């Protein structure tokens, strides 16, 4: 037995990210990143990158956010056309629910002025009807279909890059919320050969239904407890930032608009029935209150009395009334939030929702007071997968610059203890792993993280500086900080 002296540092159970996208996170690490930049700066950065590419090669970047720009105007293709005349360029919005493309990319994807838009999507247009370069929601697929998958990177290399990053944050288990079929087999193979170390839990992106992988139900604890197939990820609506989350009332900053949704009630129940019949868990992306209401009702009808035992999940669950919270918690559904995203969203949500509905946004205290667990994640690549930033955001309800000073609805903050639970014991339970993971005890799998400070003894302002120093999975150190 090896004894490691932590010199007064703190060990916590291995941290669990309940919602991320590993390969996409790995791709992100090498992508053009325009976050925090103005539209002109972003276009100039794209121009510099494109200049190094062959003419005609696709450039894919990410990170713009019109809410940070003067006037909050959506970007326009013309800025990219000027900077990148020889390459099709697509830059994802920070939330990945809309894209900004140049004319060459729009033409390559066959986006023409009179093109009808699929339900749940939107093509932004100039006054004369020409697409202005922003596509929101489902219609983005026409662009992505033309682009090289994973930006031309090797998906296993991208996965391993994401794994290295996540291990350095003290993460020991990660739920991949929307695994593609081809990647599932690729990763299973790698895990069978003992290559990755992070515990990986797959919720399959499953449309159309995939009997080959899902037909036999969940498969947990494969590859010595490193690899699990847990369930299916469904997608109901969009995002608040892109004004595509499905709301029961108009957006405060866009009268007449309530976002969009992907399912009619009957279709959603049919999909959920299919998942239930295979004994799988269902995780559904719901952000707007209308989407959440539809999902909670559907889960209630499809699962009936046995709902509590299924541990089905509401991914994001960002806007919900007191009554809806009561209904969801009453059914034992699991709210799966990303507190780290609040640091971005607190600058945008008040405009989207207006003063009356803002009380329904990110109302975590409401859930905890009803006796619910909360599971936490990053939605990486949307936000950093660093769980310590998530813990800070959950407790401080401010961004990394300590804004707003008074906190964003601070009454809904979690305690440090609750935030830690949302990254450890509660997600272990939500994945049916509470006997093995999520706490330190005899008979558990010995996953833990060493942190540079005791979070419970750290003043709120200082929490944002907390760092992992060492990550241990199954009793073996898998990452050690040079600072340790
Ligand atoms: Zn996601």
Image (cartoon, rainbow, N blue to C red):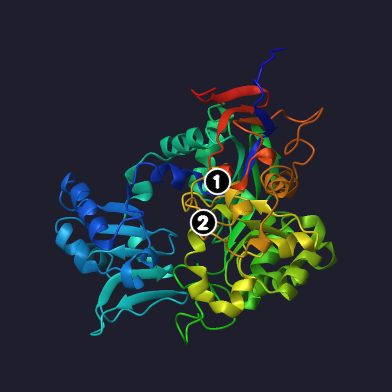
Q: In the rendered image of this protein, does residue 227 appear above or below residue 218?
A: above
Label 1 crowd bin: few (<14), some (14–19), many (20+), radius 10 Å: many
**SS at circle 1:** helix
Quadrant in which residue 274 is drawn: bottom right
Mark number displayed over residue 358:
none
Task: Say which residue label 2 marks.
Answer: 343
In terms of depth relative to the viewer, which is nearer, 400 or 297? 400
Among numbered discs 1 and 2, the one appearing first in the sequence: 2
The answer to whether the residue labelled 1 contacts the one labelled 2, judged by CB atoms less than 8 Å apart, is yes
Residue 2 on image: x %, y %: 69, 13
Is 455 left, or right, of 51 in this rendering? Answer: right
Disc 1 CB within 8 Å of nearest ligand 1 atom? no
State the image coordinates of residue 364 (x, y, percent, origin top left).
68, 61
When asked about the image quadrant of residue 266, the answer is bottom right
Using the rendered image of the protein, determine whether residue 162 is visible from the camera's viewpoint: yes
Question: Which residue appears farthest toward the right when viewing the image?
Answer: 305
Q: Residue at horizontal 38%, vertical 39%? A: 154
Q: What residue is rendered at 31% in x and 55% in y? A: 147
Measuring from the top left, give residue 26's x and y in whole percent.
Answer: 43, 41
Which one is nearer the viewer's eye here, 449 or 365? 365
Please provide percent x and percent y for residue 61: 32, 53
Question: Quick one: quadrant of the C terminus?
Answer: top right
Kindly identify which residue carries mark 1: 389
Residue under the image location 61 percent in, 47 percent down: 460
Quadrant showing the N terminus:
top right
Left or right of 228? Residue 443 is right
Whether residue 291 is visible: no
242 left or right, relative to 277: left
Name the secondary structure under disc 2. Answer: helix
Characterize the local packing of mark 2: few (<14), some (14-19) or many (20 or more) Cα atoms within 10 angstroms: many
Which one is in front, 56 or 475? Answer: 475
Task: Please identify the residue farthest to the top as the structure is shown.
Answer: 1
């Amino acid at each position: 037995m090896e004894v490691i002296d932590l010199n007064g540092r703190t060990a916590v159970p291995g941290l669990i990210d309940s919602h991320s996208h590993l390969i996409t996170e790995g791709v992100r690490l090498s992508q053009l990143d325009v976050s925090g930049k103005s539209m002109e700066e972003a276009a100039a950065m794209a121009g510099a990158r494109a200049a190094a590419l062959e003419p005609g090669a696709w450039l894919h970047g990410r990170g713009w956010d019109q809410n940070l720009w003067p006037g909050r105007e959506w970007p326009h293709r013309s800025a990219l056309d000027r900077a990148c005349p020889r390459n099709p360029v697509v830059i994802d919005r920070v939330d990945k629910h809309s894209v900004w493309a140049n004319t060459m990319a729009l033409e390559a994807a066959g986006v023409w002025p009179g093109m009808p838009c699929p339900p749940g999507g939107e093509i932004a247009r100039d006054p004369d009807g020409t697409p202005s370069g922003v596509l929101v929601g489902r219609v983005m697929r026409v662009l992505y279909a033309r682009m090289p998958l994973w930006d031309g990177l090797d998906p296993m290399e991208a996965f391993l890059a994401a794994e290295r990053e996540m291990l350095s944050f003290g993460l020991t288990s990660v739920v991949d919320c929307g695994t593609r079929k081809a990647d599932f087999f690729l990763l299973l193979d790698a895990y069978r050969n003992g290559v990755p170390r992070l515990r990986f839990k797959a919720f399959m992106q499953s449309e159309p239904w995939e009997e080959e992988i899902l037909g036999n139900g969940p498969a947990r604890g494969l590859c010595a407890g490193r690899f699990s197939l847990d369930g299916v990820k469904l997608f109901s609506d969009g995002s608040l930032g892109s004004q595509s989350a499905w709301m029961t009332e108009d957006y405060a900053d866009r009268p007449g608009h309530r976002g969009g949704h992907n399912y009619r009630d009957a279709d959603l129940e049919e999909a959920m029935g299919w998942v239930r019949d295979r004994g799988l868990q269902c995780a559904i992306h719901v952000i707007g209150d209308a989407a959440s209401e539809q999902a909670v009702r559907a889960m209630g009808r499809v699962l009936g009395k046995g709902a509590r035992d299924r541990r089905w999940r509401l991914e994001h669950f960002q806007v919900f009334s007191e009554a809806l919270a009561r209904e969801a918690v009453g059914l034992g559904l699991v709210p799966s939030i990303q507190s780290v995203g609040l640091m971005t969203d607190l600058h945008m949500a008040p405009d989207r929702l207006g003063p009356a509905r803002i009380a329904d946004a990110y109302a975590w205290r409401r859930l905890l007071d009803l006796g619910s667990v909360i599971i936490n994640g990053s939605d990486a690549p949307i936000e950093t997968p660093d769980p310590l930033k998530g813990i800070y955001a959950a407790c401080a309800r401010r961004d990394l610059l300590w804004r707003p000073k008074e906190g964003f609805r601070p009454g809904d903050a979690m305690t440090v203890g609750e935030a830690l639970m949302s990254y450890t014991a509660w997600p272990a339970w939500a994945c049916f792993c509470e006997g093995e993971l999520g706490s330190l005890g005899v008979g558990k799998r010995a996953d833990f993280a060493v942190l540079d400070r005791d979070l419970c003894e750290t003043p709120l302002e200082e929490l944002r500086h907390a760092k992992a120093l060492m990550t241990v999975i199954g009793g073996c150190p898998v990452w050690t900080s040079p600072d340790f």
